[in-house]
Amino acid sequence: MKRDHLTITPSGDRDLVMTRVFNAPRKLVFDAHTKPELVRQWLLGPPGWSMPVCEMDVRVGGKYRWVWKKDTDGSSMGMGGVYREVKTPERLVSTEKFDEAWYPGESLNTLVLVEQGGRTTLTQTMRYESREARAAVIKSGMEKGVAASYDRLEDVLAATSGAGR
Amino acid sequence: MQATHRLDAIFAALADPTRRAIIARLASGQASVNELAEPFAMSQPAISKHLKVLERAGLISRGREAQRRPRRLEAKRLEEADKWLERYRQLWEGNYQRLDALLDELKAQEKERKPR
């Protein structure tokens, strides 16, 4: 089942590590993480949210800015950061900070793509400023606006997880 | 904030591979410190240190048998941490399923552009 491809594990004191396999060469997976016109098609969160602002200057020292908007009530959520390392098509390191951060500091996100037999393993490591910040981020998954309508999300997941790739 | 502290202690405890292996072992039944140390080629004090961390996080507890003091899993605490991670995972899985569809599209476009 598709849903089982994604693993999220706490690692060390401050890291969260996500891994997921994609049925595509890593050049395309890298494109999907670095080209704004592609990013805004998938990086959306729960149903009903769109991404009206997606600006990305993908080079070392370049900035990015993302804003999501909930279509029903117009509420929005923004975040941004700076690219620290860009190694096409295998590695992307960037900082991340939400406009209204509910945890201290920013996180350092490292995306690593490894291709084997036309499939790509994505490893995304998020390093938070403290253990406390890491716990706050995970906890927010249930309480914050990002996850406003989990019941609906669960329905969608249940409906799509049975479908073939 | 209390819940965040508790969650932090649980994640810190689970962030170590040996401790995750101990949890996995205890999931199939309680065990003494000796029994737990066996598969890891680790000294008893080293294992005891890991057990202390797990105990402080409330993930394991000690049985009453005076000699063995078997450790057992506190499944409720583990489920608590699991529940948080599961929510977070579902959010990302939603994104990644959209990415799956996008990648399929991109692959199809590439094939059209470069017919072989």
Image: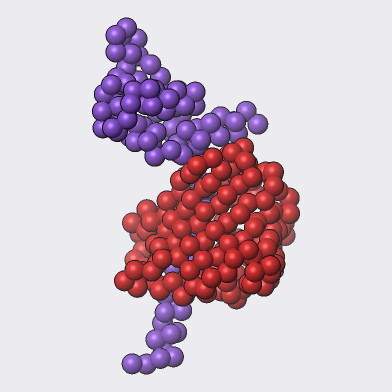
Chain colours: A red, B purple
**Vertical side of B35 occupied by A152: above or below:** below
Residue at left offset 60%, top offset 31%: B5
Q: Nearer the viewer, residue A130 or A100?
A: A130
- Whether residue B102 appears in this view of the structure is no
Q: Quarter-wise, where is residue A104 in the image?
A: top right
Residue B17 x/y as whole percent: 39, 39
Residue A57 x/y as whole percent: 67, 73
Residue B113 x/y as whole percent: 44, 91
**Vertical side of A1 occupied by A29: above or below:** below
Residue at left offset 58%, top offset 56%: A109
Q: Nearer the viewer, residue A81 or A152?
A: A81
Would residue B97 be found to the left or right of residue A84 on screen?
Answer: left
Q: Quarter-wise, where is residue A43 in the image?
A: bottom right
Residue B103 x/y as whole percent: 45, 73
- The quadrant the N terminus of chain B occupies is top right
**Vertical side of B33 occupied by A10: above or below:** below
Residue at left offset 64%, top offset 69%: A60
Residue at left offset 42%, top offset 79%: B107
For the view shown, which residue lies furthest in the bottom direction? B115
- The quadrant the C terminus of chain B occupies is bottom left
Would residue A18 be found to the left or right of residue A92 on screen?
Answer: left
